[in-house]
């Protein structure tokens, strides 16, 4: 489904567009060189990945508080995918999916200490476009286990683990340090061959275990000081009480108590979270400015996304993991090198689609092992949609984070929690109940539909392995 950019922006002004899922369509033939050898006319590619940035933390989607002018401008000039999701909401699995174009069911990276195998790295977008002639750079959070794959890149500036916002001996914030590394790369770029830069932020992820969870660059401290952040629509005690017992005692609730349990904590930590995102926006702005100075902006494809969403007190929870929209729905912006006619697209897209899109942009053949689809078929107008349903799965081992699976369609969501010795189910009508507060799994008239989702989940689980 498509809606005009004008209608979408009018909806923002009237306050009605927050529930609209969409993107901007670009041109009839995005990449006329597909299938031909790499040449210097191929676009450079920059892939920005934020960490734990939820979908609604952009001004362009109707958030009237957060300041993200550079990302908003990028979206206005390019493709804004508001109906974008992750297939597993946790860092290592989601990042592995972005890198490989495969569901966790196939790449099997569920834990923080699990690395990509040499063959997986070779067949990731990193390996394939480097083989095709791109100068390959990685900057920032790697997010997977094992030794850092420094030799698989022409320029490696990545780090293991979660990292620190302020490292010893440096007064610079992590976001600015990563930005500076990207600016150095662009200053040195001689245009002998196209480059692919992957910049993976630590922000706005919390500094787990620290007294100050969301540690900001001081230059953004003045932002949002005189603003009161409204409560999220599902932050009432009644919303929390409606959760099953195992979610009420989950790690999400434990972390909520340290971050969002009082009005003062809520205001402080959400503002800090927003400031970290504004810092990312500033970083993107600095890099775009440098691209323009070097006459590279219109030769570069830019993708911006996040590896997970984040609960900011929604349902009495913090962090991610669970299959609610706040956790699985993330931003996706894509700007192609040449200005094109723009429309808004309402197709569901996934993090599994990013890798084949990068290959498509680079003119590299997409391997049969890839389970996602190139988004260029949407932006070119070739397709109206990529899927009518998709599979969610979270198998990270943690005593306070129940494993789960699910199916999301445009109208419904089915969730199945894999508890010890039993299962728990939820079914939500997303049209009648977009906030996902009324579980229909035990309602008699929905039992046939419930059974259909069970069968669909079993089918997808088998086929995606």
Image (spheres, rainbow, N blue to C red):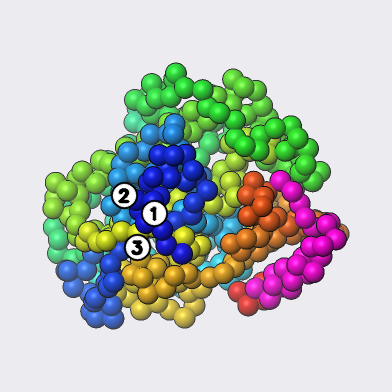
The relative height of residue 69 versus residue 446 in the rendered view (above or below) is above
Q: Position of residue 330 (x, y in %)?
A: 50, 50
Q: Which residue is mark 2?
A: 76
Q: Give me the residue at 39% from left, 25% from top.
A: 223
Q: Which residue is mark 3?
A: 25
Q: Are discs 1 and 2 less than 8 Å apart at CB? A: yes
Q: Is residue 440 magenta?
A: yes
Q: Main secondary structure of the magenta part?
A: helix
Q: Nearer the viewer, residue 67 or 462?
A: 67
Q: Magenta region: which residues? A: 437-460
Image quadrant in which you'd find residue 316: top right
Q: Is residue 11 left or right of residue 194?
A: right
Q: Nearer the viewer, residue 14 or 148?
A: 14
Q: Are discs 3 and 1 less than 8 Å apart at CB? A: no
Q: Position of residue 53 (x, y in %)?
A: 49, 44
Q: How many marks?
A: 3
Q: Is residue 337 left or right of residue 379?
A: left
Q: Which residue is mark 1?
A: 80
Image quadrant in which you'd find residue 23: bottom left
Q: Give me the residue at 31% from left, 49% from top.
A: 76
Image quadrant in which you'd find residue 342: bottom left
Which numbered disc, 2 or 3, marks the residue that appears first in the sequence? 3
The relative height of residue 188 versus residue 32 in the rendered view (above or below) is above
Label 3: element kind: loop
Q: Are discs 2 and 3 less than 8 Å apart at CB? A: no
CA distance for labels 1 and 2 = 8 Å
Q: Is residue 375 magenta?
A: no
Which numbered disc, 3 or 1, marks the residue that appears first in the sequence? 3
Q: Residues within 10 Å of mark 2 (few under 14, many from 20)?
A: some
The relative height of residue 355 versus residue 235 in the rendered view (above or below) is below
Q: Position of residue 127 (x, y in %)?
A: 37, 69
């Amino acid at each position: 489904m498509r809606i005009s950019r004008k209608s979408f922006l009018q909806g923002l002004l009237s306050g009605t567009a927050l529930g609209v899922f969409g993107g901007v369509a670009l041109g009839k033939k995005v990449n006329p060189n597909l299938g031909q050898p790499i040449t210097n006319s191929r676009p450079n590619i920059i892939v920005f990945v934020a960490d734990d940035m939820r979908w609604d933390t952009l001004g362009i989607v109707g958030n009237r508080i957060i300041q993200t002018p550079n990302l908003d401008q990028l979206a206005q000039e390019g493709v804004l995918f508001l109906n974008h999701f992750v297939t597993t909401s946790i860092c290592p699995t989601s990042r592995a999916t972005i890198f490989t174009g495969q569901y966790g069911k196939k790449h099997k990276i569920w834990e923080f200490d699990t690395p990509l195998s040499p063959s997986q790295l070779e067949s990731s977008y990193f390996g394939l476009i480097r083989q095709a002639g791109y100068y390959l750079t990685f900057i920032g959070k790697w997010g997977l286990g094992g030794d850092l794959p420094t030799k698989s890149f022409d320029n490696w500036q990545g780090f293991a683990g979660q990292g620190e916002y302020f490292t010893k001996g440096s007064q610079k914030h992590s976001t600015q340090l990563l930005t500076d590394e990207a600016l150095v790369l662009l200053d040195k770029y001689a245009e002998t061959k196209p480059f692919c830069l992957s910049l993976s932020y630590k922000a706005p992820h919390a500094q787990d275990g620290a007294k100050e969870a969301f540690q900001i660059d001081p230059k953004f401290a003045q932002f949002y000081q005189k603003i009161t952040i409204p409560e999220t629509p599902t932050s009432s005690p009644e919303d929390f009480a409606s959760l099953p017992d195992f979610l009420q005692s989950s790690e999400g609730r434990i972390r909520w108590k340290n971050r969002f349990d009082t009005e003062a904590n809520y205001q402080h930590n959400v503002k800090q979270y927003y400031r970290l995102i504004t810092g990312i926006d500033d970083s993107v702005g600095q890099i775009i400015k440098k691209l323009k100075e070097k006459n590279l902006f219109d030769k570069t494809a830019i993708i911006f996304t996040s590896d997970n969403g984040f609960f900011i007190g929604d349902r009495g929870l913090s962090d991610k993991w669970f299959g609610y929209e706040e956790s699985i729905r993330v931003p996706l912006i894509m700007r192609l090198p040449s200005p094109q006619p723009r429309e808004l697209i309402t197709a569901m897209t996934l993090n599994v689609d990013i890798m084949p899109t990068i290959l498509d942009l680079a003119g590299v053949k997409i391997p049969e092992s890839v389970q996602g689809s190139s988004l260029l078929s949407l932006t070119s107008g070739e397709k109206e949609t990529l899927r009518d349903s998709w599979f969610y799965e979270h198998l990270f081992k943690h005593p306070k984070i129940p494993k789960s699976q699910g199916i999301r369609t445009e109208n419904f969501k089915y969730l199945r929690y894999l508890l010890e010795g039993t299962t728990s189910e939820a079914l939500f009508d997303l049209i009648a109940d977009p906030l996902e507060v009324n579980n229909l799994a035990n309602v008699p008239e929905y039992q046939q539909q419930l059974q259909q989702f069970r069968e669909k989940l079993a089918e997808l689980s088998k086929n995606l392995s």
